[in-house]
Amino acid sequence: MVRITTDIAEAVECLNREEVIGLPTETVYGLAGNIFSEKAIRNIFSIKQRPLFNPLIVHIGKAEAVEQIAQNIPLPAYQLIAAFWPGPLTLVLERRAGIPDLVTGGKDTVAVRMPNHPMALALLEALNYPLAAPSANPFGSISPTNARHVADYFPEQLELVLDGGPCERGVESTIVGFPDGVPTLYRHGSIPAEEIEAELGQLAYLTRKEHAPDAPGMLSRHYAPATRIVMSTEVAQTVAENTGKRIGLMLFSKPLQEANVAHQEILSPKEDLKEAAMHLYAAMHRLDQMGLDLIIAERFPDAGLGRTINDRLERAGK
Ligand code: TXA
Ligand code: MG
C-alpha cells in the first residue's frame, strides 16, 4: 500500500534500495529512480507501462552536473541553463558514455533538467546519483499535479510518494534540443516558446511526424482522460449541438451563463494563463471522475502558455 509522506530521509532510503518513488517537481509529479540502477529504471517503465524506446529525463540537483551527463554542450544550451535553471526547461544534449541505454532509449542524446522545487532539490542534494523521472501517470493518461493523483494511479505499485504540495506550474517542462546545432523546440511546456526565443532568437519547430518516433510526449493521443473531450472556440454552440448528453465544461475565465451542463471548471477567473496552466490537469482529473458523456474544453488564445495548453487539449482530444 502506497504511503504519502513529506519525509525526505524516507525517500532517500527508498531510492537507495533501488525502489521507485513519486517525486514532486514544479511542473508535474514524476516517477523517480536512480539512473544507474537497472532495477529501478526497468521498474519505472513497467509501472508506467511505457514502451522501452521512449527515453526518460535525467533530473539533477546542480546545474554543473550537466557536464557529467552530457558532452559537447553547445553555447546556446549554456545560455538557456543560465536563464532558466533551476526551472521547467529540459535540454536534449549529446550523452556521455556512462549514461545507461535504458535511460536514453539507446539514443546518442540524453534529456536533462534541474527542477525548481525545494523538496526535489533537497532530495537530489542528499543523493549521490541523478534521478530519471517521467511524469507519474500510466502511459498516455493525464499527468499528476498532486501527491494524491500519484497515489490513486499506483496504489499498489509504489511504496512512497513524497508530498511537495500541488505543482506550481501544472504542465510539463518545455523541451529544447539542438539537432545539427539548431535550437529546436521538441515539446511546448511551462516556459513559453516566446521566452526561449527572447534568449536565442527564432527556434526551429519539429512537426509531429518528424518527432513522433523520438518523443512520445509528442504522440498525437496523450495526456488524455477516459472521457471523450473536444475542443471548441464556440462553447455555447458546441453545448447546443450535444443536447441530451451529460456535459462538463473546461473554460478559461468565465462560466457559461444558463448552460444546461453537469459541471463547469473555470481555470482562471482572473484570466491569467499561468494560473490556468496550474489548474489544467487537476480540472481534467475532476471532470474525468464525474461519469460525463463529454468534456468540452474552450480553446485558449494561441500565444505564450496558451499554446502549451492548446497543445495538451488537442492531444487529449485525439
Ligand atoms: O516536467 C517534466 O518534464 C516532467 C517532470 C517529472 O520532470 N517529466 C516529464 O517526463 O514530462 P516524460 O517522460 O513524461 O516526458 C519526457 C519527454 C518524452 O516525450 C520523451 O520521449 C522525451 O521527453 N525525451 C526524453 N529523452 C529524449 C531524447 N534523448 N530525445 C528526444 N526526446 C526525449
Ligand atoms: Mg509524460
Image: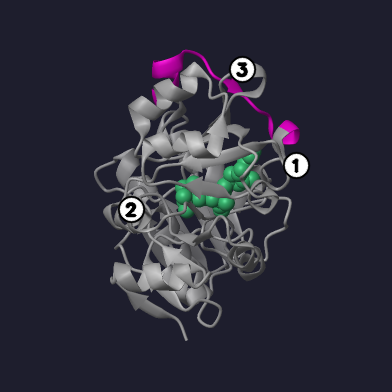
Tell me the distance, in whole angstroms, between the alpha carbons under discs 2 and 1.
34 Å
Q: Amino acid at mark 3?
A: Gly
- Extreme residue in the bottom direction: 1
Q: Amino acid at mark 2?
A: Glu
- The residue under label 1 is 213
Mark 3 vs 2, N-terminal side? 2
Q: Nearer the viewer, mark 3 or mark 2?
A: 2
Q: Residue at x 65, y 39 (%)?
A: 97
Residue nearest the observer in this picture, 215 or 288: 215
Quadrant housing residue 126: bottom left
Mark-to-mark CA distance, 3 and 2: 32 Å
Q: Position of residue 81 (x, y in %)?
A: 40, 29
Q: Which residue is disc 2 drawn over?
A: 125
Q: Residues within 10 Å of mark 1 (few under 14, many from 20)?
A: few
**Image position of 3 (left or right of 216):** left
State which tag comes first along the sequence, 2 or 1. Answer: 2
Q: Up-down: is 114 above or below 170? A: above
Dot 3 surroundings within 10 Å: few (below 14), some, or many (20 or more)?
Answer: few
Q: Which residue is depicted at the point 38% across and 67% down? A: 12
Membership of 201 in magenta stretch = yes
Find disc 3 in the rendering and name its residue.
Answer: 181
Q: Is residue 102 visible?
A: yes
**Residue 95 x, y percent position in the rendering:** 62, 36
Mark 3 to mark 1: distance in Å?
A: 20 Å
